[in-house]
Amino acid sequence: MNIAELLTYTDIDQLNRIRRTYGFEGSVHSKNELIRTLLFHLGGRRELSEQIRSCDAVQNRFLQLVFFDLRDVFSMEELLGKAKAAFGKEEGDLRSLILWLLKRGWLFPGVTPRTRHLYQVPGDLKEKINRLFAEEYLEDAVEEPVVYRDEQGMLARDLHRFLSFVMHNDVPLTAEGAIYRQHQRKLFKSFIVPEKPVDKKGWRFGFGRRYHLYPDRFSLIYDYAYYQGYITEEETGWIRLTEKGAGKILNDETESSQEIYRFWLRLYRKPVPHLPVVVRWIDLLARGRWTSVGVISKAVADWIESYYYETEETLLRRILKMMMHLGVVRMGEGADGKELVSVTEEGHALITGVSGFSEEGLDDRFSNPLFGKRLV
């Protein structure tokens, strides 16, 4: 519902409470006059912009958590969870944030039988506020990059090539559970986007159950195939294709980009709990245009924290790199050497088609390499 409809369903006492929150006088002779007065104030671009700028840091984070979510309807429990995330490590009154939105007319009690015990965000107001958030960071027009990479559709096709490789080759595993390096090299040469086996000198953990054994992109492909039950790691030390995996090859089925993207969101929420906010920021800032990585870095600064050996900067670059592999963004370089990002149309459809906020992180069976192993 849009804000005009929600105001129509709201009783006059609540309408007057919203009016008093903004401190302006409005006619109370009729409900219709009061609604018109509120719409004039709430719908104005300048007024909304000033209200957002007046928010403190916690209110600003709460607003993003609510308005960046693709859903328009929330339970009290969900809103309290968002309020807790907005406060972060600070102590605060969670319900005060919800009351703050209600008083401003940015959140309403549900009005239909289906939403009676829920709370609803006006759809048109959400769009306006999200645009205003983006405009705070957007630079002047950015020139087209000199070169760029676009990998749309390639990861799903390389997943198919991996399954085909396992079907037509004997693939033994090392004692550590990795595909032998000579087999990796052979496999990677067949990929549209080739990689090299990892250099074991560096620390690698936290981004999947086999992330420590394989390069970033193939690690995602491998873990996804394992998660979907397309491959199995036999106790005898071999990778085998399951009946389900063989069906993907025999029927020449291309994997759904949406399912791979959803898996990535759930997998990477372990090291980046607020990943759904980050990808929404990227979509708001870089859809249909080229935007510098520096601008995105400023916008998401509140939502990425260092993770063991990963800094905020390296985490953002890892996120952007994986989004490129997923076909969600293109990455380029300007004439001045500046790193640029642009969200693809397919990427926008994925980001707005999968509500990352309601996707939980994967359990340890699919994300922790030590799951089920005895630690000595």
Image (cartoon, rainbow, N blue to C red):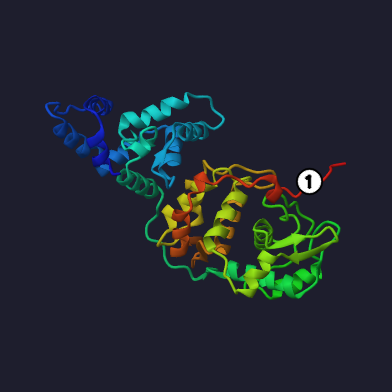
Q: What residue lies at 26% left-to-right and 25% top-to-bottom?
A: 17
Q: Quadrant of the C terminus?
A: top right
Q: Quadrant of the N terminus?
A: top left
- Horizontally, residue 184 falls left or right of residue 330, namely right
* Residue 156 against residue 322 in the figure, above or below: below
Relative image position of residue 82 (x, y in whole percent): 48, 35
Q: Which corner quadrant of the image does residue 118 belong to?
A: top left
Helix, strand or loop at label 1? It is loop
Front-lying residue, 162 or 337: 162
Residue 120 in sight from this viewpoint: no
Relative image position of residue 32 (x, y in whole percent): 15, 34
Relative image position of residue 258 (x, y in whole percent): 52, 59
* Residue 163 against residue 7 in the figure, above or below: below
Residue that carries the numbered disc 1 in the rendered image: 372
- Horizontally, residue 206 falls left or right of residue 93, namely right
Three-letter amino acid code at the position of disc 1: Gly
Front-lying residue, 106 or 366: 366
Relative image position of residue 324 (x, y in whole percent): 55, 62
Q: Which corner quadrant of the image does residue 69 belong to?
A: top left
